Image (cartoon, grey):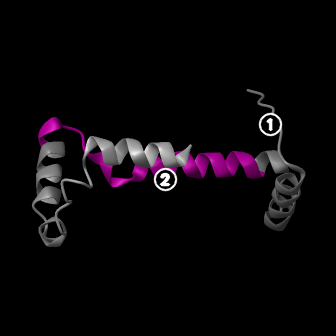
Amino acid sequence: MTIQLQLKPEIEARLIAEAAAQGLSVEAYLASLIEKSLTSHEESFFYQVSTQEEWETILTDLINSPAFSLAPALSDAAISRESIYTREDEML
């Protein structure tokens, strides 16, 4: 498969330098980065959970963990519709 990317000149220069430092061509270096990225996602914990029951158990354990019980509750104002839309308007 052939994929073409338009990179900023400074990113391209860094890519070439990293590939050279690894002793690889740019193509081989990019392929290795992509493979590592995809492999790391597959190896993450959540990809290993296979059944709905396992997901529910993990989620329940997380919700019941001390980190959640120690966290202060959000105020009504913090979760109000007006608060949400106000923050969104400020971002624009």
The secondary element bearing badge 2 is classed as helix
Image: 58 above or below 21: above
Tell me the kind of residue under disc 1. Leu
Please name which of the two marks, 2 or 1, marks the residue nearer to the observer.
1
As drawn, the label of residue 71 is none
Estimate the x, y position of residue 61 in percent, counting from the top left: 12, 58
Kindly report the secondary structure that dominates the magenta region of the rendered protein: helix
Residue 84: horizontal and vertical position, in percent?
Answer: 35, 45
Q: Is residue 47 visible?
A: no
What crowding class fits label 2: few (fewer than 14 Cα within 10 Å), some (14-19), or many (20 or more)? Answer: few
| Residue at image mark 2 | 40
Residue 11: x %, y % from top left:
82, 54
Asked if the stretch drawn in magenta spans residue 40, the answer is yes
Q: Quadrant of residue 1?
A: top right
Q: Amino acid at mark 2?
A: Ser
Residue at the disc numbered 1: 5
Region rendered in magenta? 29-53
> Which of 52 and 91 lies nearest the eye of the viewer?
91
Residue at 24%, 39% (x, y): give it: 50
Left/right of residue 84 with respect to residue 64 in the rendered view:
right
Which circle's residue, 2 or 1, is located before the other in the chain?
Answer: 1
Q: Check the image and report above or below for 64 versus 32.
A: below
